[in-house]
Structure formats: structure tokens, C-alpha cells
Amino acid sequence: MSAPDLGGVAVIRLRGVGSQLQDKLARLGIRTVQDLLFHLPVRYMDRTRIAPIGGLQPQTEVVIEGEVRGTDVVYGRRRSLVCRLQDNTGTVTLRFFHFSNAQKLNLAPGSRLRCYGEVRLGSSGLELYHPEYQFVDSTRPEPLEQGLTPVYPATEGLSQQRLRAIVNQALAMLEEGRIQELLPEALSGTPSWSNAPGQPGNAGVSGGNSDAPRSLEAALSYLHHPPADAPIALLAAGSHPAQQRLAFEELLAHHLSLLRLRRRLQRQRAPRLPRQPALEQQLLAALPFTPTGAQRRVAAEIARDMAAPVPMLRLLQGDVGSGKTLVAALAALNAIAHGYQAVVMAPTEILAEQHRASFEDWFRPLDIQLAWLTGKLKGKAREVQLAAIAEGRAQVIIGTHALFQDTVQFCRLGLTIIDEQHRFGVHQRLALRQKGSDRAIPHQLIMTATPIPRTLAMSAYADLDCSVIDELPPGRQPVNTLAIADSRRNEVVARVRTACHAGRQAYWVCTLIEESESLEAQAAEATARELSLSLPDLRIGLVHGRLKPAEKERVMTAFKAGELDLLVATTVIEVGVDVANASLMVIENPERLGLAQLHQLRGRVGRGSTESHCLLMYGTPLSRQARERIAIMRETGNGFIIAEKDLALRGPGEVLGTRQTGEMQLRIADLQRDAHLLTRIRTAANALLDHQPARADALIQRWLGDNERFAQA
Ligand code: ADP
Ligand code: MG
């Protein structure tokens, strides 16, 4: 192979691609000829048959051929050029909103046209808007397309014809064998498709090469130019073997990248921290409860990891209220017992504050020193904390992502605990890992209250071991969830009054569509004022993200102490509030929130032994999706089921959060659709890394390219 691999050939090398087109292609993420080949059609058109005009149906894509009967400029709501086209079965209108005078003259009566376009119901009956067209000569019939015509994801100023033309050049280079086959056939495991039932012949698969139908080359040329009899429905569903061949390779590349990262990590050293029962027993003895079986089990799993000289990298999943904090505290305690520091990091101030409160409660009696660091801590107070951390006086350090900053120097960091993993990316996890001493890197425990569906966990977190707390502390009652239209607001207010008069406490959560903390705060303020008027005898507090931490804490403490009956809040209380006497939650406009967030919010009630209620007070009309979400919330309180449904409704990108999607950007595969491939992918990934590491590297480079660089740490 003398010519360079297409992954290294820039698109500007193709005929007809100048710097302008290069920029447009870059907008589609296409930089190399290989990128262009991976830019697959979103759908296909059948231009292999001419449809009789008399039999056209709206909302279908057709090829028609006929004679121009007349062409006029029409002044309706918008000026348009209207051309009547007739064959021996009927007449149809072609309509152009953008046109030139030359075009009008060209479409002269008597000329013959072949048109491609979508049939719609327009003001003159059936019409084709802006069809592609060409003039034909009835004495020399123009050949029709032999295969299906691809329709590509495009961008402004880049036509389908132009894209097709350059893809065809790329395909010609592909046929010269200039793309490396990286998947050993035995591993790909996809069936060949050229002889699949319903697809006679070998059309679309280049060459007569017997192993061609499974190769990358064959898959790509098939998908850019499927034969006329290709199974369109299968292609539209993304489940054609040629698509699956590519999805397999892409998912494998992602999996390999995580696995390689993990293996590198396992070659690194971490301090050995075998379990020290003395301090642990002291802590447990002081608790007002005993740990659940699930808490004990995962604590043991963590302890086993920390006893090894290899860095732990463990994901702890547990539903809201399942008691992850205690498990984290036990792990931290073990590091501290060995003279190491432990750091606990939360995604928000308020959650960090909650952790601080719990850790202070549990660790003070054990005489353990705590440090505190968030973005809002400034000046002298900050320096005091930084010094305590650097000099090793602080044994456990709690804070927000401010702990990632370079100015934070740890003394002997042995364990990093990250709460709410899905809000931090792999990048940041690595940044903290660098914070250990030169020789050893800290163990890492990552906690999430948003259970991650198994399929996602397997692919997005292939670099992690998983522990699951699958049991709630005893005595928890399911939260009764009701949906009520906001036209019945008075009834909702009455329920709040009744509950509070009976000695319970309640939350009233305000939501906003926009991600604006200040607008949301204003809305909450307005609601609090209004509720004070309709509920004058209740003690009402207000908490939102714009309050000063001290003020927020004052309100939360008052609510916790039972000095407030009703807490009006924004979604900031999603995490971090723990008040057992609160048994009623009203969520205004729940349709604005995703399932995971609703589940988190609802988890704030039902923490004590009283029966709890959650009222979803929705605005009408509800979209179909919103209605489905609300129905799911009413049906189940199980975080894992909710997470699975969330995945089905929203797709993996949103479930994992924006940070993660940047790293899981899939071009062809779809985690949901292709989940059935994952088991085979895991086996294949291990085999490749063991026996053909160079191929593994090439696969990662092909599919992840520069996005993978951060993982070289
Ligand atoms: P999450 O998993 O959502 O972080 P927390 O750690 O905040 O849950 O625990 C929720 C509440 O349950 C806290 O008040 C905590 O003290 C309490 N808790 C934790 N474990 C137990 C247990 N085994 N029995 C009773 N209560 C528990
Ligand atoms: Mg928690």
C-alpha cells in the first residue's frame, strides 16, 4: 500500500474542494477523506423508477417525467414561479420561490423535464416545491439511477449534489484499498449482507472479493450507494448489517479507549490502605441507626479495592436516600486512619454544605480535622483553608470543583470521593488524579444518585468498577405521587395548609424553562409572596441560588429545626436537603424537568416514617413526552426503572449530561439501538488489547482522533 491511508488525507486534496468548501465540510466535522466516508446518509431516495403523475400521493418522494405546459410568475402570499408539467396520466405543479428570469425562460412550454422531489398538497392541488430537475430528450431516454440515492446531513450552502460528487471521489479512493481493515473478521461477527435474504445479487458491494461483504470498505460503499432492491426499512432503522458493522467498530473504539485508560491506571501505584476497624467501629457506634446490608456490602467492596496497591476506580450507584454519604465517610475514615487525606467533592455549594454537616457530625467526636473549600470562599479565609490542606493539618477536605484548581496542593492525598459523577467529566476525574504525590496516585470513589442504566454504564463507564446500593434504609415509605392541573391551584394550597396544621412540613418547588438562576429566583420570590398572602398563618421560608451561602444556610437550618412550615425553593434543593418531617412536596410545572431531576426532587420527601405526597402541578396543555414523564413518576419510585425510561425518552447524551456527551459523541452507533452489541464488544476489546495493541491504538485514533488525547495522562 503506497498511497497514504485516507484518515491522513485532507479533504482539500479532492477535486473541486477549495478553502470555502473545506470550511463548510469542517462545520460537519469532516476534515479528512475518511471523515467524509464516515459521513453516512441520513436516508435514501428511490430514484430508480419514474412515477406516473396521475397516481402521485402527497408526502411521497418521486421521480416524474413530463412536458412543460406553461410557466408563469404568480403573485400570492409570496411571489413564485409556477410550472405545469404533464405526462399521459395527469398534470402537476412545480413551484419555485427563488428563481431567475433565465430559469423562467428555460422552462418553456413543450420542453421535457425529469424532476425529483417531494409531493405536497399546495394551493393548486398536488405540487413539488423546488424540485431538482433536468431537461431530457424523448428520443434519447436518460438512464435512471441504478441504486438508491443517498441524502446526507448537509449544512447551509452545501448542496446534496455537491456532497454526492465529493463522496464519490472518496469512494473511488476507497476502492484502491486505501482504508485499513482494522477489525479481524472473527471479531466483527457481523453477518455478510450481500447475499442476505431479500437482497439478491451483489450490487453495491465492490469487487468480487469473497470477504468483501464484511469488510469496512464494503460496508461503506454499500451504505453510500445501496442497490435498488436494498431493504430501505432496515436501513432507516439503522439495523442493516452494513450499519451494524460500522456501529460495532465505533463502539469498540470507544470501549477500547476507556479500557486502555483503565489498564494504564492499573499499572500505576496507589497507597495500600487495608481496612482499619477501630475508628470505623467508633463511628458506627455513635450512629442513631445501623447500616443496611447493602451499605455494608459496598463498604466491603471499597475496602477491598483500597487495600490493593493499585488505584481504585469505583462507581457507587445508589438511589436518592440510599445512604451513600455514610459509605463515603467510611472510605474516608480508612484513608485517614492510615495518615492520608481524603477529599470529598460535590457539584454544588449546597450539596457540599450538606456533606460538611454530615462529616462534621460524624468526624468531630473522632477528633478529625476538616477543611472546606468552595469557589465562594475568598481572601484570608481561603488562605487558611489552603494552608491547612497543604500542610496536612486537614484530614478530610470537603468542597466543590474549586478543589480542581492548581492552587490547591494536597499533602498526602489517598482518596478522592466525587459525588454526582455525571456532572463531572473524565477530564476532571483525571485532573484530580494528578493531585496525588509523584509515586502514588489516590484511590477514587465516584458516587451518583442518578442510577445509570446498565447499557450506558457498560459503555460510558467501562473504565470503572461498579457497586450498587440496592436497598433503602428501613421504614421508608413510597411517596404517593399525584398529577394536578394548575387550574386547581387552590386545592393544592389547601393541602399544604392541612399538612402544615397537622405538624408536617412542606416544600414548594418553582421551576423555570430558562437556565437562569436570577429569573428562577425572582419566580420563587413571587411565589413566596403570593403563598404568604393565601397562607398567612404558616411560617414560610425561601431559598434559591442567588442567596448568600450564610443566608441559605440560615433558612435551611430553620427549616430543618422545624421553625418553618413551608419552604419555597427553586431546584437548588434537588440535592442536599434532608428533613425527615417534610412529607409534602409541590412541584410547579414539573413538565419543565427531566425524569432524573424530578426523581431527585421527590427524593427530598419520604425520608421519615410518615406517609409522604408529591403533587405535580402541571401547566396545560401537556406535550406527549411530558405526559409520559408524569405517568412514569406516578407509576414508580424506583430510580433504576426511572433511569431506563429516561434513557428511552431522552437518549444517552442527555442522560449522561453535557460534559459526558462531548466525550461520547457517536457518529454512527446509537447506544440504545446498538446495546445488543455491547457484550461482544467487551470480549473483542479485551482480546484486541491483549493480542493486537497496535490495532487497538489505530481504531481509537480512527474513531476518537484528537478527542482521545486527554486520556493519554
Ligand atoms: P444519598 O444516598 O441520597 O446521599 P444520604 O447519604 O443523604 O443518601 O442518606 C439519606 C438519609 O438516610 C440521611 O439522613 C442518612 O443519615 C440516613 N441514613 C443513611 N443510612 C441509613 C441507615 N442505614 N438507616 C437509617 N438511616 C440511614
Ligand atoms: Mg447524597
Image: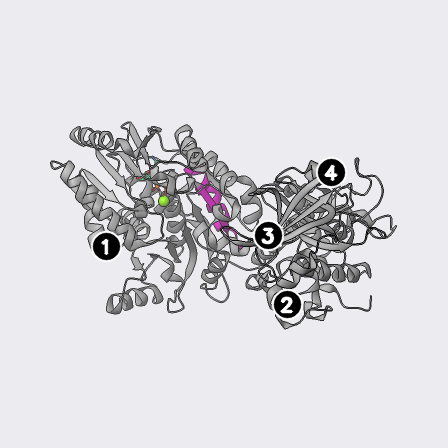
**Label 2 vs label 4, nearer the camera:** 4
What SS does tag 1 mark? Answer: loop
Give the labeled residue for mark 1: 547
Q: Which residues are magenta?
A: 295-317
Q: Is residue 506 magenta?
A: no
Q: Is residue 562 left or right of residue 349?
A: left
Q: Mark 1: is the Cβ under 8 angstroms from ligand 2?
A: no
Q: What amino acid type should be assigned to the residue bearing mark 1?
A: Leu
Q: Are marks 4 and 3 in contact (CB under 8 Å)?
A: no
- Badge 1: how crowded within 10 Å, few (<14), some, or many (20+)? few
Question: Alpha carbon of mark 4 to alpha carbon of mark 1: how far?
Answer: 73 Å
Give the labeled residue for mark 2: 21
Question: Alpha carbon of mark 2 to alpha carbon of mark 3: how far?
Answer: 24 Å
Q: Which numbered disc, 1 or 3, marks the residue that appears first in the sequence?
A: 1
Q: Is residue 301 magenta?
A: yes
Q: Which residue shows up at 70% across the image and 36% down it?
A: 55
- Badge 3: how crowded within 10 Å, few (<14), some, or many (20+)? some
Give the labeled residue for mark 3: 666
Give the labeled residue for mark 4: 89
What SS does tag 4 mark? Answer: loop
Q: What amino acid type should be assigned to the residue bearing mark 2?
A: Leu
